[in-house]
Image (spheres, grey):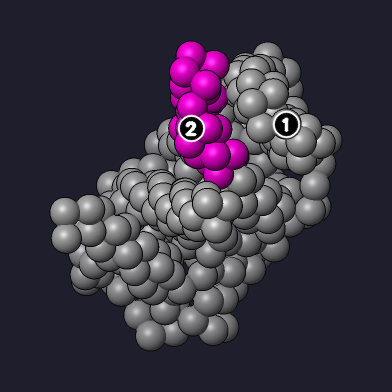
């Protein structure tokens, strides 16, 4: 029972992540408009929402431009997620980009920032009062609905922790390799190999979940991006580590060669994943001048699931490493017993 608590914790955390992470609804949002530019005069705009209730609770709509509001002259709910809105856009709006705001009692205030490029700009207009009534929206647990990401934002609980788990396991591998170089310990050599094997399993899952995410957000399964290419190069380097182990029959020599290779492989992994992507242009969040994903999405609504997901997947990875280690240790003892 002494070593059982963290395994129970890993199981409970991952159950929590799967249930809460997949069942929690996204916040209602405006996801698309039929018009991307507005000019002075009458404008008709179709507005599509996600998780909205336009027919059931109605909607009030306006254009927001540098603290100036232009109220809709007509709002028709075509469906719960579809509005047809008419504006009379005045000349003189100050800002180049205008936001679209939709308010309903059930959904609250929904905004699509930078929805329109504004033509006919000037010194400003008299703002209009467009909102009547109060929001009846309940303060329930919900995830942010980010443009482009939408439902795929839940992949945050799977894709990112896979790489965290891989780094932890490869760190164990390089630590055990240092022990091999210092003490010529065969048990540490087996542990180093197991850490790399399990780490590569999580790296593969990280690539798969990342490719699925790229298909949704970048409309391609793979792109020539420093972060993606660095991840693939890391996997190839560590696959070569396993090939090296299988090509040297003498145990002591294999252990030392593999340990030396592991130290260099770990250094290259840090270079490919954490250094080079930050020095080059990259689509990946947090690299090449892109703001980190956490700047926008690890807020109070996602954090209660994201951080338990990281801990849960890391504990699962260590659990897999421990089970594989114990199995190899038992096989080694049985082999020694048979030889005697």
Taking depth in this image into account, of 222 and 248 the one nearest to the observer is: 248
Disc 1: CA contacts within 10 A as few (<14), some (14-19) or many (>=20): few
Rounded to the nearest angstrom, the CA distance separating label 1 from label 2 is 16 Å
Residue 324 vertical position relative to residue 136 in the rendered view, above or below:
above
Q: Which quadrant of the rendered structure holds the N terminus?
A: bottom left
> Magenta stretch mostly in which secondary structure?
helix
Taking depth in this image into account, of 288 and 178 the one nearest to the observer is: 178
Residue 333 vertical position relative to residue 242 in the rendered view, above or below:
below
Taking depth in this image into account, of 268 and 122 the one nearest to the observer is: 268
Q: Secondary structure at mark 1?
A: loop
Provide the residue designation for mark 2. 188
Horizontal side of 70 relative to 7 (left or right) equals right
- Looking at the picture, how far across and down is residue 13, in whole percent? 30, 60
Count of number-bearing discs: 2
Provide the residue designation for mark 1. 250
Disc 2: CA contacts within 10 A as few (<14), some (14-19) or many (>=20): many
- Looking at the picture, how far across and down is residue 114, in whole percent? 58, 42
User: Image quadrant of residue 291?
Assistant: top right
Q: Secondary structure at mark 2?
A: helix
Instruction: Please tell me which residue is depicted at 68% across the width and 55% down the height of the picture.
Output: 208
Span colored in magenta: 171-196
Return the residue found at the far left: 2
Instruction: Please tell me which residue is depicted at 57% across the width and 52% down the height of the picture.
Output: 339
- Looking at the picture, how far across and down is residue 251, in whole percent? 66, 32
Taking depth in this image into account, of 42 and 177 the one nearest to the observer is: 177
Q: Is residue 191 within the magenta segment? A: yes
Instruction: Please tell me which residue is depicted at 56% across the width and 76% down the height of the picture.
Output: 82
The mark nearer the N terminus, 1 or 2, is 2
């Amino acid at each position: 029972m002494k070593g059982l608590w963290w395994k129970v914790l890993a199981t409970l955390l991952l159950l929590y992540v799967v249930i809460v992470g997949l069942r929690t609804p996204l916040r209602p949002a405006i996801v698309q408009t039929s018009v991307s530019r507005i000019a002075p005069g009458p404008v008709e705009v179709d507005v599509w929402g996600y998780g909205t209730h336009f027919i059931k609770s109605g909607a009030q709509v306006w254009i927001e431009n540098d603290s100036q509001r232009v109220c809709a002259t007509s709002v028709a709910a075509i469906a719960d997620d579809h509005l047809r809105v008419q504006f009379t856009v005045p000349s003189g709006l100050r800002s180049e980009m205008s936001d679209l705001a939709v308010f309903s009692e059930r959904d609250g205030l929904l905004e699509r920032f930078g929805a329109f490029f504004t033509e006919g700009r000037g010194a400003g207009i008299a703002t209009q009062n467009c909102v009547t009534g109060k929001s009846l929206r309940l303060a329930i647990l919900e995830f942010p609905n980010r443009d482009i990401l939408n439902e795929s934002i839940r992949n945050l609980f799977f894709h990112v922790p896979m790489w965290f788990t891989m780094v932890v396991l490869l760190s164990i591998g390089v630590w055990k390799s240092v022990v091999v170089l210092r003490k010529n310990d065969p048990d540490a050599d087996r542990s180093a190999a197991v850490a790399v094997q399990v780490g590569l399993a999580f790296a593969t899952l990280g690539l798969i979940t990342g490719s699925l995410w790229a298909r949704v957000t970048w409309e391609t399964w793979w792109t020539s991006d420093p972060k993606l290419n660095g991840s693939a190069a890391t996997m190839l380097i560590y696959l070569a580590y396993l090939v090296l182990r299988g090509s040297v029959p003498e145990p002591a020599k294999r252990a030392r060669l593999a340990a030396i290779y592991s130290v260099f492989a770990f250094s290259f992994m840090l270079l490919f994943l954490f250094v080079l992507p930050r020095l080059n242009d990259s689509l990946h969040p947090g690299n090449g001048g892109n703001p980190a994903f956490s700047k926008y999405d690890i807020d109070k609504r996602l954090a209660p699931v994201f951080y338990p997901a990281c801990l849960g997947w890391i504990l699962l990875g260590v659990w897999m490493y421990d089970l594989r280690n114990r199995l190899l240790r038992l096989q080694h003892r049985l082999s020694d017993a048979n030889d005697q």
